[in-house]
Image (spheres, grey):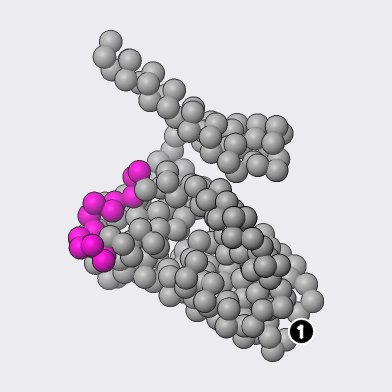
């Protein structure tokens, strides 16, 4: 438990201000404050929750909500390929671990320090992140309803900043200039070619690059 808290606390504490930003956004969208912890507990998908606030406030069609959810959360397909779900026992445990597979949980779960974790440490880490996110959202909703905050200067960049930190930390653990350079090149290319669909195009291009590298490596190994 000490190791779980030691690895999860630095990232988990960032969930409080991020969750509060979500709570503020929920209140400013005209929804009741209690929708903030509901969004955080039920959706629990980071950036999608921020988009979902606008979709819910404007009563967007179900098809739009479904397509947005699929596009934004498509990255989790790649996370599932290497997340240690095989070390989680029990149907309920696997179901909850799959449901709470977030960017932060993936970063901790695949770290070298967590290579020996089994069911309890993995689920405890994910539960800790889940509870902190819900707590932050509830606090943000309550504070946002009590205080007339007109602008949330800087909080809109908090989620992006956290992802940047996670990326830097992952590179420090496994320094791979070829992979990092390919990811940056794909992101820049997608931003220039299709800025409106940057995330999907960048992931597609990066996947293609990784597949080409994998096939080239296999040919080299056979030779």
Q: Between residues 60 and 131, which one lies in front from this camera angle?
A: 60
> Can residue 13 be seen in this snapshot?
no
Query: How far across and down, in percent of the image, does residue 190 sit?
Result: 65, 35
Q: Which residue is depicted at the point 28% across and 17% down?
A: 221
Quarter assignment of residue 145: bottom right
> From the viewer's perspective, is residue 161 above or below residue 220?
below
Q: Is residue 145 one of those drawn in magenta? A: no
> Can residue 68 be seen in this snapshot?
yes
Q: Between residues 222 and 28, which one lies in front from this camera angle?
A: 28
- Which span of residues is magenta-colored? 81-93
Relative to 64, 85 lies left or right: left
Secondary structure under the numbered disc 1 in the rendered image: loop
> From the viewer's perspective, is residue 135 above or below residue 11?
below
Q: Between residues 213 and 63, which one lies in front from this camera angle?
A: 63
Q: Which residue is depicted at the point 60% across and 36% down?
A: 201
Task: Report the residue marked by disc 1.
Answer: 148
Tell me the chief SS of the magenta region.
Answer: helix
Q: Which residue is depicted at the point 58% across and 68% down?
A: 18
Q: Is residue 82 one of those drawn in magenta? A: yes
Query: How far across and down, in percent of the image, does residue 111 sit?
Result: 35, 51
């Amino acid at each position: 438990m000490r190791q779980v808290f030691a690895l999860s606390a630095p990232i988990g504490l960032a969930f409080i201000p991020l969750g509060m930003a979500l709570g503020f956004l929920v209140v400013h969208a005209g929804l009741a404050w209690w929708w903030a912890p509901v969004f955080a507990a039920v959706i629990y998908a980071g950036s999608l929750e921020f988009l979902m606030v606008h979709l819910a406030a404007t009563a967007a069609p179900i098809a739009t909500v479904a397509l947005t959810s699929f596009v934004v959360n498509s990255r989790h397909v790649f996370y599932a390929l290497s997340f240690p779900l095989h070390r989680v026992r029990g149907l309920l445990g696997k179901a909850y671990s799959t449901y709470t597979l977030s960017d932060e949980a993936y970063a901790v779960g695949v770290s070298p320090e967590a290579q020996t974790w089994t069911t309890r440490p993995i689920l405890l880490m994910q539960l800790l992140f889940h509870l902190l996110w819900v707590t932050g959202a509830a606090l943000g909703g309550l504070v946002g309803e009590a205080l007339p905050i007109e602008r949330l200067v800087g909080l809109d960049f908090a989620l992006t900043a956290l992802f940047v930190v996670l990326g830097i930390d992952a590179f420090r653990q496994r320094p791979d200039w070829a992979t990092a350079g390919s990811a940056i090149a794909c992101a820049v290319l997608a931003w220039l070619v299709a800025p409106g669909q940057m995330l999907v195009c960048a992931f597609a291009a990066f996947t293609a690059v990784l597949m080409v590298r994998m096939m080239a490596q296999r040919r080299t190994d056979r030779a």
